[in-house]
Structures are given as C-alpha cells and as structure tokens.
C-alpha cells in the first residue's frame, strides 16, 4: 500500500465511527488545506513534509516511523544519528536486515533494573 | 522489558501477549498553590527529558548506578505528573522514595490484595500525586532530600532513596482473553491522553517527591482483582531525579525552562482540567493523609515561603472523559 492509500484507508476507517475524521477536519487539525490532503491521499502530490507526517501520525494514531518510511523519508533524529557514524550504522542496518524480530529486539537497549 | 523511547518508558511483555504493555511519561506541569484549597487538574506542558543512568555512569553517584534505571531533571519545588497510555490493562505500582503513592506503605514488589496499592490502566490515565483522601491527591513536588519535606522522610524518617519507583504487571493472558477477546468486537482503548523529605544526612544531590497542593483526582478501584495480574512478569524501573544544575553538569544539556506559575497560567486564560469516569474511587491512605505539605512544612521550619504560591481561581475548566482525555497545555 502506498503512503496516500494508507492515509486514506486509516482516515476513512476512523471516520466510520467518528465524523471528526473527515478530510476537512483532519486537514484543519494538521494545518493544511483540505484540497492538499485530498491530493496527498490520491497521490497527486508527493508526500508532505516530516512535520506534517508527524502531525498525521499523531492524528491517526499511527507510528510516525512507519509513515515516514512509507513516504520515503527518514526521521530527522535518525538522520542525525546516522550522519554522526554513517559507516557504522549503514553496516549495522545491512547486517540486521534479515534478522528475525526477536534478534533485533535484543539489540534494542533495555532500561536496566538494579538493586534497590 | 522496558525501553526508553523519546523520553517515554515503554513496558512490553511479549511473552504474555503481543499487545501486553503500557507507556509511562513524566509530564512537566505548573505547581498548584499549596494553600489547602483544592484545585482541578493542571495542564501537561510536555515530557521531562529522560536519560539512561548507564549512559552517564561515571558522573553519577554510585548508588544511582547500583539501582539502574533512568533519570530526569527537576527544579526545586517543580511539580510533575505521570501519564499512562496504552490499551492493554496493566497494574502499576508507583512509589516516591519507596513510599507507595497510593497506600503510603513501604515498597514491596508484589501487589497487595488487602489494600489496593496500585493503579489500573487504562482506566487510570494519569497520577498527579499522593492519595491523601477519597477523590483528592497532594501534588508531587520535587524537593531536595535531607530537608524533611519528602513523603519518604516524613513517613520512613530517612532520606535514603528519593526518586520514583515503578513496577508494572500486565493482565494475565487468559483474563485478557476473557474480557477483551470475545467475539464481540471491542475497540482497543488507547488513552493517548493527556491528561515528588527528616534528617540532613545525604551528600548526594538527588531529589525526592514531597506532598504539595491539594488536587481533585480520583484513584480508581481495581475492578478485576489482584488475581487478574501476571505477577510473574513484572518490570520495574527506578526513576532518579537530578536537580537541574546537576542534570546539566551530567549530560551537558540544558534542562527545560521553569514552568509558569499557577497565577501566570490562569491569568493567561489557559485551561485547567477535570476528569470524569464512572470508576469507583479508592479511599485515601491514612498515612498519606497525615503528611505535612511543603508550604506547611516551610512555615513549620520558618523558611522562606514558596514563590508562586498565591491562591488562584481557575476560570476555564475543561471537562475530560475517556472519550476525549487530552490534557495538553501551552504557555
């Protein structure tokens, strides 16, 4: 599913139970013109800026990193991390690309519990 | 397992259920006047920045490293509230200086079946303070350890731990299935809602939570019972509190600026909040009800009065409920 289709699908699903999820009202809440949001959903324009994608993710209750990836973008905080050590992170991501989720989860840092 | 993602503690229990877990963040807020009048819920002014203790181990007290967990910066007399989110039911115990904020009892890992000493999410969207009486809490206010203000010092008589302690237990898989996975389709509740004492003995620069002003907030009774919670799968975290100067020295990052006073906020016409739920409220904890608030303690000690403690008349009070529990404030 493309970015526009995904946004439309999620928004429409929410609208089935809550009329506040019309194109007009969602556009208003993320501060864009309704016509622009409609074009995004119909893929007549490229996906919006990271800021607007973040606002959309919050509005629709979706994961911002998933939406950014679907829009062909990388979150600016991730970009900053990668730019600091590009070779290391490029290598890390390539090595992890086919690892199962549970193996990747082990790489994610846990908050350590100690003695108290 | 607990992860720290964008200043939010994320508790997950994939071994119990794919959806099992909850998130806890620590909201900056204004300190309500500590004048024995009761106030509605103050706004959330954004999350406190939270950092792994292990990332700054060489600059932190050895005791912090031993306890593990995370830390956040707080100014003296700054307030905070805990925001719970996520749709899978969890039982959460919260203590300040290892004094249970719901029951006033000393810390234990397990849930008490006799006197409820935990909150249940998602029914409980947030916790702003110590459970002092039915329908009322005293706001969590950060004060330096060793000066007699904190609940820990007032109840245990020692300034040993400080900080906040949290343990989360997910609902047992079979209980979840029974209540939430029957053929009838239930919308997953997701409250993206919005709705911190004694002998001077410590040389460590940490803070503890003291009872501040009185606030109208109910702590809801556990409608499932202690058997519903998977106590073999708990995850706990020590949340240390660094004073702001210490935080900057440790991390090199500036802490957030001070929140507005209740007076400034109210004069600006900004909203306060009230939360309605049909849940049954717990009675207050006797021990916590006897705590001396920060302002009263200051008078008792003959210290300088708290800044920004003038009474206010909250004008705009927004009513919140489960369906629209957004508690954001801008200043």
Image (cartoon, coloured by chain):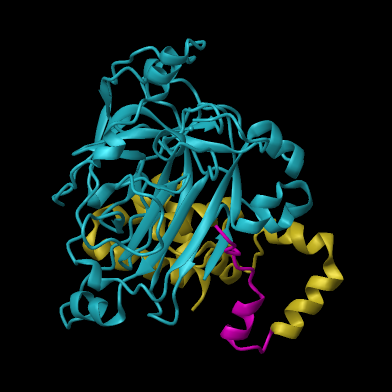
Chain colours: A yellow, B cyan
Q: Is residue B268 left or right of residue B41?
A: right
Q: Chief secondary structure of the magenta span?
A: loop
Q: Give the tally of numbered discs.
A: 0
The residue under the point 28% across, 61% down is B112
User: Residue B146 magenta-drawn?
Assistant: no
Q: Is residue A36 visible?
A: no
The residue under the point 43% across, 60% down is B167
Q: Is residue A6 above or below residue B140?
A: below
Q: Is residue A22 above or below residue B208?
A: below
Q: Is residue B48 left or right of residue A16?
A: right
Q: Is residue B46 visible?
A: yes
- Residue A31, horizontal then vertical, whole percent: 46, 44
Q: Is residue A57 above or below residue B100?
A: below
- Residue A44, horizontal then vertical, whole percent: 52, 65
**Residue span colored magenta:** A97-116
Which of A87 and B124 lies nearest the eye of the viewer?
A: B124
- Residue B62, horizontal then vertical, whole percent: 71, 51
The residue under the point 41% across, 62% down is B109
- Residue B78, horizontal then vertical, whole percent: 50, 29
Which of B160 and A63 lies nearest the eye of the viewer?
A: B160
Q: Is residue A66 left or right of residue A85?
A: left
User: Residue A112 magenta-drawn?
Assistant: yes
Hey, which quadrant is residue A103 in on the image? bottom right
Which of B237 and B203 lies nearest the eye of the viewer?
A: B203
Q: Is residue A89 above or below residue B77?
A: below
The residue under the point 49% across, 79% down is A1
């Amino acid at each position: 599913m493309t970015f526009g289709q995904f946004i439309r699908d999620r928004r429409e699903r929410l609208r089935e139970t809550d009329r506040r999820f019309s194109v007009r009202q969602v556009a208003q809440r993320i501060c864009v013109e309704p016509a622009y949001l409609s074009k995004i959903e119909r893929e007549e324009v490229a996906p919006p800026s990271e800021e607007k994608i973040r606002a959309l993710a919050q509005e629709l209750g979706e994961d911002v990193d998933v939406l950014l990836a679907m829009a062909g973008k990388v979150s600016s905080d991730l970009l900053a991390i990668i730019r600091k050590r590009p070779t290391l992170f490029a290598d890390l991501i390539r090595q992890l690309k086919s690892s199962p989720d549970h193996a990747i989860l082990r790489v994610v840092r846990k908050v350590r519990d100690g003695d108290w | 397992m607990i992860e720290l993602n964008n200043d939010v503690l994320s508790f997950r229990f994939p071994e119990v259920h794919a959806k099992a877990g909850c998130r806890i963040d620590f909201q900056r807020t204004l300190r309500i006047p500590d004048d024995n009048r009761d106030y509605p819920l103050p706004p959330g002014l954004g999350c406190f920045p939270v950092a792994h203790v292990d990332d700054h181990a060489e600059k932190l007290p050895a005791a912090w490293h031993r306890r593990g967990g995370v830390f956040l910066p707080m100014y003296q007399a700054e307030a905070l509230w805990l925001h719970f989110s996520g749709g899978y039911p969890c039982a959460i115990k919260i203590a300040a200086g290892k004094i249970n904020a719901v029951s006033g009892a000393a810390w234990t890992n397990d849930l008490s079946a006799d006197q409820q000493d935990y909150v249940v999410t998602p029914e409980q969207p947030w916790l702003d303070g110590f459970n002092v009486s039915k329908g009322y809490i005293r706001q969590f206010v950060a004060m330096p350890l060793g000066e007699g203000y904190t609940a820990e010092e007032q109840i245990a008589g020692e300034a040993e731990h400080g900080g906040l302690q949290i343990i989360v237990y997910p609902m047992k898989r079979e209980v979840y299935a029974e209540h939430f996975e029957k053929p009838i389709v239930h919308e997953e509740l997701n409250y993206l809602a919005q709705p911190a004492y004694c002998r001077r003995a410590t040389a460590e620069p940490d803070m503890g939570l003291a009872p501040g002003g009185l606030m109208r907030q109910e702590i809801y009774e556990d409608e499932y019972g202690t058997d519903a919670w998977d106590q073999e799968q708990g995850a706990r975290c020590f949340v240390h509190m660094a004073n702001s100067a210490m935080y900057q020295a440790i991390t090199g990052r500036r802490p957030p600026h001070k929140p507005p006073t209740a007076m400034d906020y109210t004069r600006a016409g900004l909203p306060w909040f009230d939360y309605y739920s049909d849940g049954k409220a717990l009675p207050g904890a006797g021990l916590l009800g006897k705590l001396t608030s920060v302002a009263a303690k200051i008078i008792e000690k003959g210290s300088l009065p708290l800044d920004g403690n003038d009474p206010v008349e909250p004008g705009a009070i927004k009513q919140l409920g489960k369906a629209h529990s957004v508690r954001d404030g801008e200043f």
